Image (cartoon, helix red, strand yellow):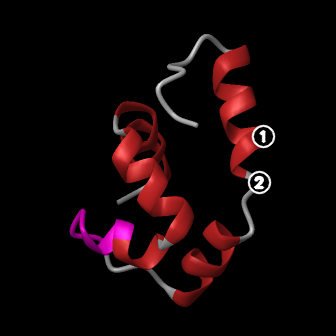
Amino acid sequence: MNLQQLVNKVMSDPNFFEQLKSNPAAALSSQGAKPTPEQIEALKKINYKSLVDVAVAFGGSTGVT
């Protein structure tokens, strides 16, 4: 899974987004990805509220929280 695919999945699947926030390794694995430890650590550091705010500001879906 590349970054564009990850963003598309997050924006289109609120359940995936919630799982990504709580357990990034399991979320990515559920999509067939094999995340590296660096990717997992990076995902754990994301401010997800800010990510949602940016998506909304750019006219993205508000289906994620």
27 to the left or right of 43: left
Give the numbered dot on residue 47: 2
Which type of secondary structure does the marked residue at label 1 adopt? helix
User: Which quadrant, please, contains the N terminus?
Assistant: bottom left
Position in image of residue 22 (x %, y %): 53, 68
On whether residue 29 falls in the magenta region, the answer is yes
The foreground one among 7 and 27 is 27
48 lies left or right of 4: right
The x and y percentages for residue 45 are: 74, 69
Q: Which kind of residue does numbered mark 1 sit on? A: Ser
Q: Give me the residue at 70% from left, 40% from top.
A: 51
Image position of 9 (left or right of 61): left
Task: Give the CA separation, mark 1 to mark 2.
Answer: 6 Å
Q: Is residue 52 above or below residue 25?
A: above
Badge 2 crowding class, 10 Å Cα cut-off, few under 14, some 14 to 19, many 20 or more, is few
Which element is circle 2 on?
A: loop
Q: Residue at 47% of width from left, 26% of height from top? A: 63
**Is 43 on the left-hand or right-hand side of 18?**
right
Residue 12 falls in image quadrant? top left
User: For the residue marked with disc 2, what is the amino acid?
Assistant: Asn
* Residue 50 numbered mark, or none: 1
Q: Which residues are magenta?
A: 27-33
Nearer to me, 1 or 13: 13
- Queried whether the magenta region covers residue 46, the answer comes back as no
